[in-house]
Amino acid sequence: MTPTLLRFSDLKARGIVANWVTLNNWIEREGFPAGRMLGPNTRAWTEAEVLAWLESRPVQKAPARGAAKDKKEAAHASAA
């Protein structure tokens, strides 16, 4: 079976990444697969490797920041 190849436009259409800068940062720092060069200006990723990377990402909720953190701390303090 031939693997499904995804180009940057496919990654963007699926909501995985919004721009090349972020994608390059993910490749360099977050372990996103580098893909395969199909031509001098054509890079593609297999759907399987992209899905595997997505599955490896944490799913825990990010900690509250800024005003949301202050509100959460204030609510916790008043409950105690």
Image (spheres, grey):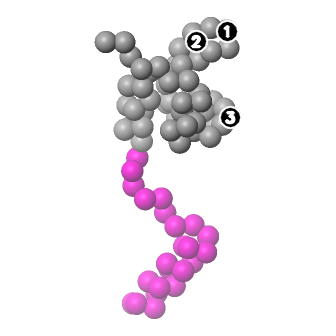
Point out residue 36 in the picture as x, y percentages from the top left corner. 53, 14
The reply to whether dot 3 and dot 1 touch (C-beta < 8 Å) is no
* Amino acid, disc 3: Val
Residue at 54% x, 80% y: name it. 71
Residue at 42% x, 25% y: name it. 47
Observer-side mark, 3 or 1, equals 1
**Is 80 placed above or below 50 here?**
below
Point out residue 54 in the picture as x, y percentages from the top left corner. 42, 37
**Is 72 placed above or below 24 here?**
below
Q: Quadrant of residue 39?
A: top right
Instruction: Give the prevailing secondary structure in the magenta stretch.
Output: helix
As drawn, the label of residue 21 is 3
Q: Quadrant of residue 25?
A: top right
- Residue that label 1 marks: 40
Kind of element beneath mark 1: loop
Q: Is residue 59 magenta?
A: yes
- Residue that label 2 marks: 37
State the quadrant of the C terminus: bottom left
* Label 1 to label 2: alpha-carbon separation: 7 Å
Q: Residue furthest top?
A: 39
Point out residue 79 in the picture as x, y percentages from the top left corner. 40, 90
The reply to whether dot 3 and dot 2 touch (C-beta < 8 Å) is no
Q: Which residues are magenta?
A: 58-80
* Amino acid, disc 1: Pro
The reply to whether dot 1 and dot 2 touch (C-beta < 8 Å) is yes
Side of 57 where 32 appears, left or right:
right
* Amino acid, disc 2: Met
First along the sequence among labels 3 and 2: 3
* Label 3 to label 1: alpha-carbon separation: 19 Å
Q: Residues within 10 Å of mark 1 (few under 14, many from 20)?
A: few
Q: Nearer the viewer, residue 44 or 62?
A: 44
**Is 17 placed above or below 33 here?**
below
